[in-house]
Image (tube, helix red, strand yellow):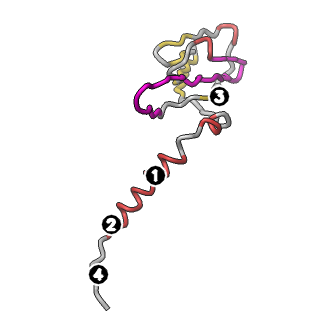
Amino acid sequence: MALVRWNPWQEINTMQRQLDRLFEQSLVPAKAEQRTFIRVPAAEIQDTSDAIHLKLEVPGMEAKDIDVNVTENAVYISGERKTENKTEEKGTTRSEFYYGKFQRVIPLPARIQNSNVTAEYKDGILNL
């Protein structure tokens, strides 16, 4: 029986390659699967003495494609980022951008007057 020197780094490298393949193949949704996956945009909320400020990260959108509903207790945001259809004459394009539906419900820390809410969308950030 021959002795073989064990290299623990070889196993770690093998696991790293397997994880890379997993992320490349199964976590980038196919076009058919994109329709069922709903993204939740990142948010920041700041409660001051006179207002509640809410920021949501929704890059690559137009303001008209974002739906915002505000009640006394919560903010409901939804929309859809449409896929850009490009035709390449040479080569292929790989995109890791997210296209599809998103939605988020954010409970507010205090009751608000929803008639006083203002919204601004700039540089991929929705400010309420």
Q: From mark 3 to mark 4, how far is it between C-alphas?
A: 55 Å
Mark 1–mark 3 distance (CA, rounded to whole Å): 29 Å
Residue type (three-letter) at the residue carrying disc 4: Val
- Lower sequence index among marks 2 and 1: 2
* Mark 4 Cα shell of 10 Å, populated few (<14), some (14-19), many (≥20): few
> Dot 2: few (<14), some (14–19), or many (≥20) neighbours within 10 Å?
few
Q: Which residue is mark 4?
A: 4
Q: First in sequence, mark 4 or 1: give its number.
A: 4
Write down the quadrant of residue 112 in the picture.
top right
Q: Which residue is mark 1?
A: 21
* Residue 10 circle label: 2
Q: Residues within 10 Å of mark 3 (few under 14, many from 20)?
A: some
- When the figure is inspected, residue 63 is found, relative to residue 92, above or below; the finding is above
Secondary element at image label 1: helix
The mark nearer the N terminus, 3 or 2, is 2
Determine the residue positioned at 54% across, 47% down: 26
Residue in the image at 68% along x and 23% along y: 76
Q: Secondary structure at mark 4?
A: loop
Which region shows up in magenta?
66-95
Marking on residue 103: 3
| Residue occupying image coordinates x 53% and y 44% | 27
Q: Is residue 64 magenta?
A: no
Instruction: Please tell me whether mark 1 or mark 3 is closer to you in this view.
Output: 1
Amino acid type, mark 3: Gln
Image quadrant where one finds the C terminus: top right
Q: Nearer the viewer, residue 51 or 115?
A: 115
Judged by depth in the image, the label closer to the viewer, 3 or 4, is 4
Residue 77 numbered mark, or none: none
